[in-house]
Every structure is written in C-alpha cells, then in structure tokens.
Amino acid sequence: MGVHYILSIVLVSSLICLSIQFESLSSSQVTSIEKKLRSVIRGGNIATAVRLTFHDCVGGCNGCLNVDDEENAGLADIIADLDTVYIENGYDSMLSRADFWALAGMYSVDKAVTNANDECDEEDCEVPDSGLVFQWGRVDCDTAPYTDSDDGLPSATMGHADVMDFFATEFGFDANETVALMGAHTLGKASSGNSGFSGVWINGEADMFNNEYYKRLVDSDLDWKHRDATRNTDTTHWQWNVPGSTFMLNVDVCLYKDIIVDDDGKSSCDFSTCEDAPTASAVEAFAASNDVWIPAFTSVYTKMLAHGATKLNDLS
C-alpha cells in the first residue's frame, strides 16, 4: 500500500506541475521565442518548417514525428535543431512541442511573405500580411518529439478525387480550403533523396510566399512535361515540369486539370488536353489576387494547426 500511495502522490504532483507549466503564455513571451527561432528558420528551413507542421498535424498536431518513416525524410535535422532551441531556452516549461512547431510554421509563413514583398517591384505582386494569430494548448505525445507510429500521409501521385477525399476525411476541409492550403507548395523544393521527386516548385522563389503557385498552373504559355523522376526500378514518381520555371506533383496539377492517373501516378492526358478540374475556378481566383488567396490560406492553415486539439488558448 505504501508504494502505491507514493506512486499516486508522484503522479498527481507531476500532473500539477504540467498544468502549472502551461497555465498561460503571453505575447511578449512569444515575441521572445520568435527571436530565437531566427537561428533555425532561414533559407531552406522556411519551407521545411511549414512542411513539418503538415506532417505533424496529419493524425493530430502532437509534436511527434517518426523520422524513420520514409515519408518524413528530410525533417530529422529541423526537428533536432528546433529541439535544441526548445530545450536550451527552457521553452519546455512554457509550451508544448506541438505549440512550438506550430509557432515555427506561422513564423516561417510570415518570414516568407516578407521575402516576397522585398522582391516585389510591381503593385500586383504585393502580398498582404498573413494575419495568422498564434494560440497555444496543443498536447504532445508521451515520447515527443519522436514516435514510431505512422500517420498515413497522402501519396503525391494522387488524382483530384483522392486529394479531396484525403483532406475532407483527415481535416474536414472542403474543396476550396484544400486548394487554398496546397498553395503552401509555392515554398521549397522536392529532393530525390527525400521523396524521389526532384524540382523547385517556383524557380528562384523557394523562400517566398505568394500566389505564384497558382499563376504557374493557369499560365497557358507554359509547356508542361509529364515524366517519371524515378532513378531505380519502380515507377511511382511521375511529376510535371516546365524547365527553368516550375515543378509540380500530381496533387498540385490535379487542382487545375482533371488528370486521371494509373497506379503508378502516370496521367492519361497531357496538361494541354486534360479537362479542367472541378476546382479550376478556385485556382484561377487565387492566381488572380494575393488578396483573395492569403486570407483563405490563413483560415485553412489555422484550422489545420488546431487539428486534434481539444482547446486552444489566446495569448495573455
């Protein structure tokens, strides 16, 4: 009885400590955390941090990722770098890792908006502030930041119906929300060493957040090539390229063109001969204006970052 009593006291004390640790979070504390994030969120890590938030939030945002899962290839370094900042600065007593990763993603988006505006010299390319508002209260898994579970990330070679079904089932997104979220692919690049795909979504703008992703999809002057990027014997890396301009996955192109793909991801039609996808009008609306896309993205990204949380709290 004595041992059980002591263990009960320890457990209760631990729970009390946890509740005290995450009792509140102020805007000044978040500003201080963002300053420390600068050491990690720069260059290619701007896109990687946004990718990390998506991978974390599939299955529920819980600050845990299986770095041995090939679907998460390329994320181990940023997880380790973020964790160094998280532990060395005592942020583990202020907010969960899931909250920390969510904040890193939001910070990355805002940094990439700034980068885009710094390079914008015409009125129609100006990007409005994201308006993202950080809330805290996400709960980590017991083994954060690592886990051995797999959360079932979507295949990059899917067609329109499967993409819409995944986001509706996993996050409750409607078609317009799905198209708005996918615009995050305006950031970064794919590496054959990580995913088997290879290319920069928007050449020369990998760290800029704007609606160029949609502009490339609707640009009728571009000559798209559909090719298999696989370097070994399988054929599961069909992608779309416009040399010197852009690269897209099936999950990107299917938002605008109703590609019908086989089991390997090969499309039965060319970009110019495919019929318009059911969401083509949404792509065109976002291509026409950053002022239309950015609020739509902010809304759906905020919704994604709340996936799995029972309650999120405003900053004090």
Image (spheres, rainbow, N blue to C red):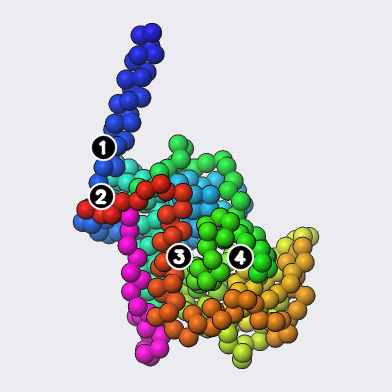
Q: Residue at x 33, y 58 (%)?
A: 134
Q: Does the magenta portion include 133?
A: yes
Residue 155: x %, y % from top left: 65, 60
Residues 186 and 301: in front is: 301
Disc 4 residue type? Answer: Met
Q: Which mark is residue 164?
A: 4
**N-term mark: 4 or 2:** 2
Structural distance between the alpha carbons of marks 1 and 2: 11 Å
Label 3 secondary element: helix
Residue linked to disc 1? 20
Q: Residue at x 42, y 43 (%)?
A: 140
Residue 53: x %, y % from top left: 46, 57
Q: Which residues are magenta?
A: 117-135
Q: Is residue 143 left or right of residue 241?
A: left
Marks 3/2 in contact by CB < 8 Å: the verdict is: no
Residue linked to disc 3? 300
Q: Is residue 311 left or right of residue 285?
A: left
Residue pushed farthest top? 1
Marks 1/4 in contact by CB < 8 Å: the verdict is: no
Mark 4 or mark 2, which is nearer to you?
Answer: 4
